[in-house]
Image (cartoon, rainbow, N blue to C red):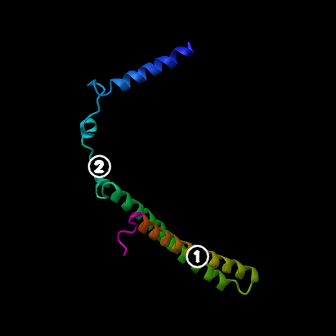
Amino acid sequence: MRNIFKPLFLITVIFLLLTWGSSPALALPADVDSVLGKIIPPPQVSGLGVGAAGISRVLSNIIIIIFVVASILFVFMVVISALQWIVSGGDKEAVAKARSRLTYAIIGIVLLALSFLILRVIGQITGFSFFKGSA
C-alpha cells in the first residue's frame, strides 16, 4: 500500500508542473489586490508608517521606552544607595552594600550608553534609522 503513494505523488507533481501555465485554474493572479483585496491598516497603527519606516518607528519607540525606564531606575538606584550610605552610621557591611549598589548602577548606565552607541553604529551600517526624534 505504501509503494503506491510515491509514484502517485510524483505523477501528480509532474502533471502540475507541466500544466502550470496552460490551465486557467492553475494560473497565478495578476496582482495581490485581486486575491486579498485592499488591505487597510486600523487607525491605531495607520500613523506609524508603512514597511520599513513603520518597523523603524515601532522599534525606535520600544528602545526609547527601555532607555527611559533604565535611566529612571539608574537615578533611583543612586538615590537609594546614597541614602543607604548616609543611614549606615559607619557600619562597614551597610557601607559595602551601598557601595556595591552604586557600582552596579554605574555599570548599568555605562552598558546603557554602550548599547546606544552600538545601535547607532548598526543603524549607520544597515541604513536602519533608530531614534527618529534625536539628532
Asked whether the viewer can see residue 72, the reply is no
Q: Is residue 53 left or right of residue 87?
A: left
- The residue labelled by disc 2 is 41
Residue drawn at x 39%, y 69% is 131
Q: Are marks 2 and 1 in contact (CB under 8 Å)?
A: no
Q: Nearer the viewer, residue 50 or 62?
A: 50
Measured from the top left, where is residue 135 in percent x and y? 36, 76
Residue 12 sits above or below residue 55 on the image: above
Residue 84 sits above or below residue 70 on the image: below
Measured from the top left, where is residue 90 in percent x and y? 73, 87
In the image, is residue 127 part of the stretch drawn in magenta? Answer: yes
Residue drawn at x 61%, y 83% is 82
Q: What amino acid is found at the position of numbered circle 1 in the picture? A: Met
Residue drawn at x 27%, y 44% is 39
- The residue labelled by disc 1 is 77
Mark 1 or mark 2, which is nearer the start of the sequence? 2
Q: What amino acid is found at the position of numbered circle 2 in the picture? A: Pro
Residue range of the region highlighted in magenta in the rendering: 126-135
Is disc 2 surrounded by few (<14), some (14 to 19) or many (20+) residues within 10 Å? Answer: few
Q: Is residue 66 left or right of residue 108?
A: left
When asked about the image quadrant of residue 57, the answer is: bottom left
Measured from the top left, where is residue 51 in percent x and y? 33, 54
Measured from the top left, where is residue 107 in percent x and y? 60, 75
Check the picture and name the quadrant holding the N terminus.
top right
Going by the picture, which residue comes out furthest to the top? 1
Q: Secondary structure at mark 2?
A: loop
The main secondary structure of the magenta stretch is loop
Residue 93 sits above or below residue 14 on the image: below
Q: Is residue 38 left or right of residue 124?
A: left
- How far apart marks 2 and 1 lie (CA) works out to 42 Å
In the image, is residue 91 part of the stretch drawn in magenta? Answer: no
